[in-house]
Image (tube, rainbow, N blue to C red):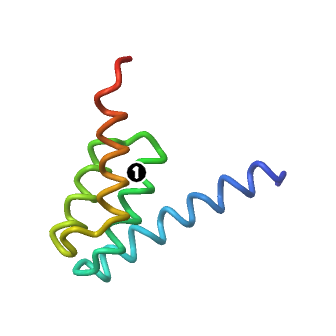
């Protein structure tokens, strides 16, 4: 296995871990914010928005989540 394969496996492992943490700690805003960030970085914008919104339901006004959501929505509005 080369370094690129190792990085891909490591990233996928982190993604799976975040999903598991969300399932286990479904009432924790940070878990949903991290899930949103994972989706955001993987261009899954609708899923990211949903996760960020859930995080804000649990912790309204969180500045990091609000900033991430604003950046996401700017990307969603951008042409092409």
The residue at 65%/58% (across/down) is 9
Q: Is residue 67 left or right of residue 46?
A: right
- Can you say which quadrant of the picture contains the C terminus? top left
**Front in this rendered view, residue 67 or 58:** 67
Image x and y of residue 8, in percent: 66, 52
The residue at 45%/56% (across/down) is 38
Above or below for 42 versus 52? above
Query: Mark 1: few, some, or many residues within 10 Å (few <14, many ≥20)?
Result: many
Please give the residue where the numbered disc 1 appears in the rendered image.
39
Image x and y of residue 67, in percent: 35, 55
Q: Is residue 17 left or right of residue 47?
A: right
- Can you say which quadrant of the picture contains the N terminus? bottom right
Residue ranking furthest to the top: 80
Q: Count the marks.
A: 1
- Describe the element under mark 1 as helix, strand or loop: helix
Residue 46, picture quadrant: top left
Residue ranking furthest to the right: 2
The residue at 57%/65% (across/down) is 13
Q: Is residue 24 left or right of residue 54?
A: right
Residue 64, picture quadrant: bottom left
Above or below for 57 versus 44? below
**Front in this rendered view, residue 23 or 38:** 38
Image x and y of residue 23, in percent: 30, 75
């Amino acid at each position: 296995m080369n370094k690129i394969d190792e990085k891909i496996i490591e990233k996928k492992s982190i993604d799976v871990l975040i999903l598991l943490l969300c399932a286990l700690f479904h009432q924790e805003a940070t878990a949903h914010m991290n899930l949103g960030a994972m989706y955001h970085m993987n261009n899954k914008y609708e899923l990211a928005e949903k996760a960020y919104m859930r995080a804000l339901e649990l912790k309204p006004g969180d500045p990091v989540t609000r900033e991430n959501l604003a950046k996401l929505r700017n990307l969603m509005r951008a042409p092409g």
